[in-house]
Image: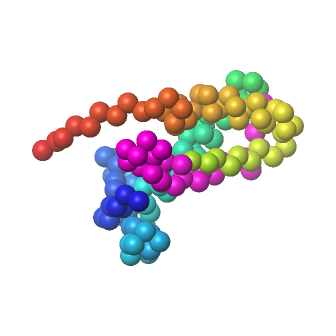
Amino acid sequence: MPPQPEGSVSVDDGSLTLALVTPKELGGSGGAGANPEQLFACGYAACFLSALLFISGRRKISLSDDSKVTAQVGIGARADGGGFGPDVGLSVSLPGLEPQVAEDLLTEAHRVCPYSHPAREGLDVRPNLTA
């Protein structure tokens, strides 16, 4: 497993700051805070739910207020031996919809979700060293 960062992360406008802690299971202190996998899971779940809302709106299908997406994110060794990569599962609950309608929405949301796209196609990252 790669080392986990300790410290904090924040967004430029100051609206969000989170403590980073390494889980005890990975040799860290544990305690209050988040780790990169949890942050990715939150972003992916929120983005996928937005994609579902977009698709259902286009199809004029109402989603229940109880609809939810839960992302399970882990990190493991890549098959090519070149480092580490995410392992992602999405659990989607769309109560009140016929199973085939829900499945169709899920499939299309996975196609249009901005997080799903790089998960399928690879992500073009441009590392840039700053002063």
Q: Position of residue 24 (x, y in %)?
A: 44, 74
Q: Is residue 39 visible?
A: no
Image-based side of 44 in relation to 32, left or right: right
Q: Given the current orientation, which residue lies at the most extreme left position?
A: 131
Quarter that holds the C terminus: top left
For the magenta stretch, what is the residue range?
Answer: 61-87
| Colour style of the rendered protein structure | rainbow
Residue at (52, 55) in percent of width and height? 74
For residue 39, side relative to residue 66 (left or right)? left
Residue 62 forms part of the magenta stretch: yes
Quadrant assignment for the N terminus: bottom left
Residue most toward the top?
58
The quadrant holding residue 9 is bottom left
* Place of residue 55 in the rendered image (x, y in percent of width and height, measured from the top left): 68, 28
**Could you tell whether 46 is left or right of 109 in the image?**
left
Give the residue at x 78% y 36%.
102
Identify the residue shown where x is 40% and y is 46%. Answer: 81
In percent of the image, x 45 and y 46: which residue is there?
A: 78
In terms of image quadrants, where is residue 97? top right
Q: Position of residue 127 (x, y in %)?
A: 26, 37
Is residue 113 visible in the rendered image? The answer is yes
Q: What is the number of callouts on the image?
A: 0
Residue 51 lies, with reference to residue 32, above or below; the image says: above
